[in-house]
Amino acid sequence: MATIFTWSIDQMSTIQEPQPNYVAEVCWSIMGVDGMYTAIVSSRYVLPNTESTFVPYEELTEETVINWIQNALGVEGVNSAKAQVQGYIDKQINPPTVVPLDTPLPWVQE
């Protein structure tokens, strides 16, 4: 089954300059679901202080802000985020085998 990825915006912080409620920082996450396996990666992005891209806060949509994040990350960053989520899912599907080692007790001198 193929992993389905979903981006979301978890929180936004604003400042009052250069415009009222100017979005300064965005906390985002990407979730992957592959059947019964789920993984999520979260991060934050500090937006550049560029008045030319200002959108009034009340007019913002989650889709607009996700586009900001994805454009800022670029193709490589988006693929890296997806790969990180996929790696977590793959480890759930095929957990790594851990082989315990017989380690001498630290208080016993040989």
Image (cartoon, rainbow, N blue to C red):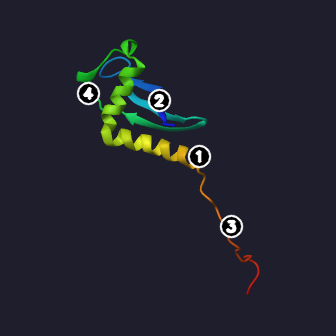
Using the numbered discs, state the Cα–Cα distance from disc 3 to disc 1 in whole angstroms: 21 Å
Q: Nearer the viewer, residue 110 or 88?
A: 88
**Residue position for label 2:** 6
Q: Nearer the viewer, residue 93 or 70?
A: 93
Using the numbered discs, state the Cα–Cα distance from disc 1 to disc 4 in whole angstroms: 43 Å
Query: Three-letter amino acid code at disc 4?
Result: Thr
Q: Earlier in the sequence, mark 2 or mark 4?
A: 2
Q: Earlier in the sequence, mark 3 or mark 1?
A: 1
Using the numbered discs, state the Cα–Cα distance from disc 2 to disc 3 in whole angstroms: 37 Å
Q: Earlier in the sequence, mark 1 or mark 4?
A: 4
Q: Secondary structure at mark 4?
A: loop
Instruction: Name the residue located 39 percent from the left edge and 27 percent from the top edge.
Output: 66
Which residue is at the far bottom?
A: 110
**Residue position for label 4:** 50
Using the numbered discs, state the Cα–Cα distance from disc 2 to disc 4 in whole angstroms: 28 Å
Using the numbered discs, state the Cα–Cα distance from disc 3 to disc 4 in whole angstroms: 54 Å
Corner quadrant of residue 46: top left
Q: Residues within 10 Å of mark 1 (few under 14, many from 20)?
A: few
Q: Earlier in the sequence, mark 2 or mark 3?
A: 2
Q: Residues within 10 Å of mark 4 (few under 14, many from 20)?
A: few
Give percent across and percent down for residue 47.
34, 31
Q: Which quadrant would the C terminus be assigned to in this image? A: bottom right
**Residue position for label 3:** 100
Query: Three-letter amino acid code at disc 3?
Result: Pro
Give percent across and percent down for residue 15.
38, 24
